[in-house]
Amino acid sequence: MVFVVGATATARTATAGDDKLAARDSRCLQHTPDQLINMGSNLPYAADAESPLKPAELQVLRSQYEKEGDYVGIQTKFNYAWGLIKSNARAEQQEGVRLLSEIFRAAPERRRECLYYLALGNYKLGNYGEARRYNDLLREKEPANLQAASLGQLIDEKVSKEGLMGIAIVGGLALAAGVVGGLVMRGAKRR
């Protein structure tokens, strides 16, 4: 089964950085799923997923998915889910994760290839626990997978950053409560 996604191997020629993304996407889209998993550093990293498909490209995937209807093939569903995860729209990302979860449950032979994109989709949605869980499963199967290592670092950085922000917010609230409490006590003593 060849892993080709619509017209995504074209487009994106505005900058040198975009050329690199298009070239990397193009390489990924011309391989079987097993080849993709074993390509390591040639796979798109999480940062690459931040560049969404053009609306026309996503529409190609959507049309194929809808055309197949109740008999949609696993590859078509995977391709569409991949395109949705690359989206900037939260609802589309959620739909992509849902479709990949269906593939993960229904097709045991395709689980390995779903792991990275489930991790990536959950990362983009801010579900860092789920993202880490899927990414760790992939890293258990493939400790040398550079793509999973890269995503793992991004997840850890985001969790750390959000944890520090949470501590700062709680600290700020505690300080504000202390100041307000002090002012109330001071006002009560004056009476």
Image (cartoon, rainbow, N blue to C red):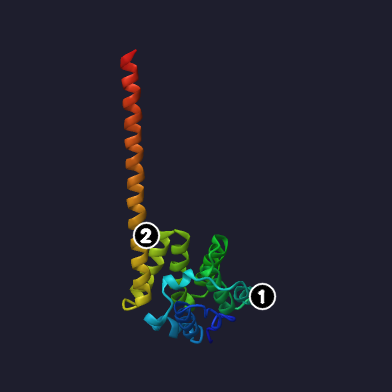
Task: Give the x, y percent position of residue 23.
Answer: 47, 84
Image spot of residue 89 (x, y percent) = 55, 62
Q: Quadrant of the C terminus?
A: top left
- Residue 181 on image: x %, y %: 34, 27
Relative depth, front residue between 171 and 77:
171
Neighbourhood count class around disc 1 (C-alpha, 10 Å): few under 14, some 14–19, many 20 upward: few
Q: How many marks?
A: 2
Name the residue rendered at 36%, 48% in the picture.
166
> Residue tagged by mark 1?
63
Q: Residue flagged by tag 2: what amino acid is it?
A: Lys
Q: Nearer the viewer, residue 138 or 49?
A: 49
Q: Residue at x 34, y 17 (%)?
A: 188
Q: Residue furthest front?
A: 15
| Disc 1, SS | helix
Identify the residue at horizontal 30%, vertical 16% (top origin).
Answer: 189
Left or right position of 88 against 63: left
122 or 70: nearer the viewer: 122
- The alpha-carbon separation of the residues under discs 1 and 2 comes to 35 Å
Q: Quadrant of residue 42?
A: bottom left
Task: Return the residue at label 2.
Answer: 158
Of 97 and 184, the residue lying toward us: 184
Give the mark nearer the N terminus: 1 vs 2: 1
